Amino acid sequence: MSSDGNKKQFWKRNAAKVPGSIQHVYGAQHPPFDPLLHANLIKAGNKPPPATPGKPKKATTFQEFESITSDAWDVGDDDDELLAMAAQNLNIEVVMETANKVIENHSKQQEKQRQDETSELDRREDDTQEEVAEDDEDNEEEEEEDRVEEGDTTSPEVSFGSQSSPYTDGRLVKSHSEAPIGSPKDAAGERAALHRQRSLPHRPPVIPLVARMADQNTSGTPAMTEREASRLDKFKQLLAGPNTDLDELRKLSWSGIPRQVRPIAWKLLSGYLPANAERRESVLQRKRQEYFGFIQQYYDSRNDEHHQDTYRQIHIDIPRTNPLIPLFQQASVQEIFERILFIWAIRHPASGYVQGINDLVTPFFVVFVFEYIEEEVENFDVSSLQEEALRNIEADSFWCMSKLLDGIQDNYTFAQPGIQKKVKALEELVSRIDESVHRHMQQYEVEYLQFAFRWMNNLLMRELPLRCTIRLWDTYQAEPEGFSHFHLYVCAAFLVRWRKEILEERDFQGLMILLQNLPTMHWGNEEVSVLLAEAYRLKFAFADAPNHYKR
């Protein structure tokens, strides 16, 4: 079937997912595109212009980033050394070396895990063979006793000498057709089963969507290591001072924030709380009162004629927010989200409410719930919290989400120009870092806007489990312009991460299904850390260097 035919079939079967289709159930994975935005970039019948080998493509110039960088990642026991390095001006060689070290360590860990699994399977196979041999000996003794009791000591098919039948592998049997259960045939079957098991891909354990987000990794081991305990102590010491050093907090937070201190760290990093410890309580009280003042002033107007459409869209989208997590299906939680989103929309008329903003509340809400509970949050009944605690969580989530959106509001104004620019920049970047992937998508007429719109609109929240999003946001809040500028490099690293799977797809439909359903359900801290390391390397290699690695 032709490429055009594949595209028509794909969009026909997925009509509700077509850009511009507001009727599509947005929470089911695919957000609506702006039809004007889509029409400008993909005109009917036009194919993407083929890349001209040897001719450099005009690149996007990214804004300047600070030369003093933060500690980028965990690479073992060298945390103190890296923190010292972070205070200096890093040149690109140092950064590339550090990023390579992170990725190399990750590869070594993966290889060690595979070797451990292979050793375990070998041990099990040896144990199985020993058990089979022991069972055979027991069977032989029982058969011999039976024959003695029955007077059958001269069976022509049995020899008590050293000679044995080639079919019995040295074991005594009554006849070839009556081999005991523990025969070589069964042992071979057991070995074959073990080899089949070894050849199957490793299946990660089932990981909660939300629970233990600070500690969870793909091994499913929640216990705090000595290193993690040491990092937690560093955070506590830093936060206990009269004036928190925000630069130092960013360096520590880049490689992840422990769950116990994440609420206060996020409030400080987002600019919601001041660095001065004495002022924090008064600021919290004032901002929380201000938010509930907005509720009293504006929320009753949600049914007014000029606000009805906004409120109706919010009311529709809220139940679709993280539908797999019971926490977000509770009526009281949905009411909180409705108030937060409606008040934000009223106070930001330039953009108003846009589908996708509803997702951005959830990480803040979950993190601030953890401030009041110790247990897992997925199935937690928020009605068990005191009313004051719920009010605090709601107000804090509103202000921190507002701080985030202040930096990316052009993503949500009319025609969403911020997203247009970011998707175009992503295409430019991928064409330079992995030309094979870029040309492959051009060959099958896959436009970046068709899959990357959601990556920019939802900050990859629909592509990653919520626990991974929260870990990602630790770094975004620690990185200068993390949600706007650094996110571009994370998206590029994320796309290239799937290059093998992308290059294996040989039609438009297969590529679109893959890119809209990337297999990240079992991702944890380890995968996110490697993704961030690669994004950091890309940032140093390409930011403000439009001709670097020019084709």
Image: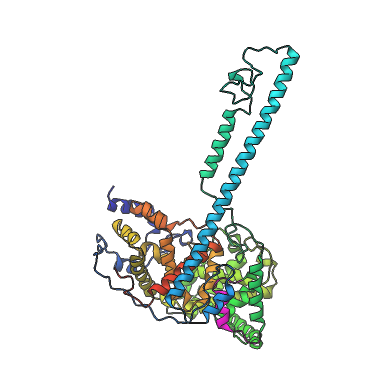
Q: Position of residue 115 (x, y in %)?
A: 55, 51
In magenta segment, residue 197: no
Q: Quadrant of residue 209?
A: bottom right
Image-based side of 149 in relation to 329, left or right: right
Q: Position of residue 252 (x, y in %)?
A: 58, 76
Q: Position of residue 248 (x, y in %)?
A: 57, 81
* Image position of 205 with respect to 414: above or below: above
The answer to whether one can see residue 527 in this image is no
Q: Position of residue 5 (x, y in %)?
A: 29, 51
Q: How is the image coloured?
A: rainbow
Q: Quadrant of residue 31?
A: bottom left
| Stretch in magenta | 242-257
The answer to whether one can see residue 225 in this image is yes
Q: Nearer the viewer, residue 299 or 442?
A: 442
Q: Nearer the viewer, residue 185 or 158?
A: 158
Q: Quadrant of residue 424?
A: bottom left
Q: Nearer the viewer, residue 230 or 382?
A: 230
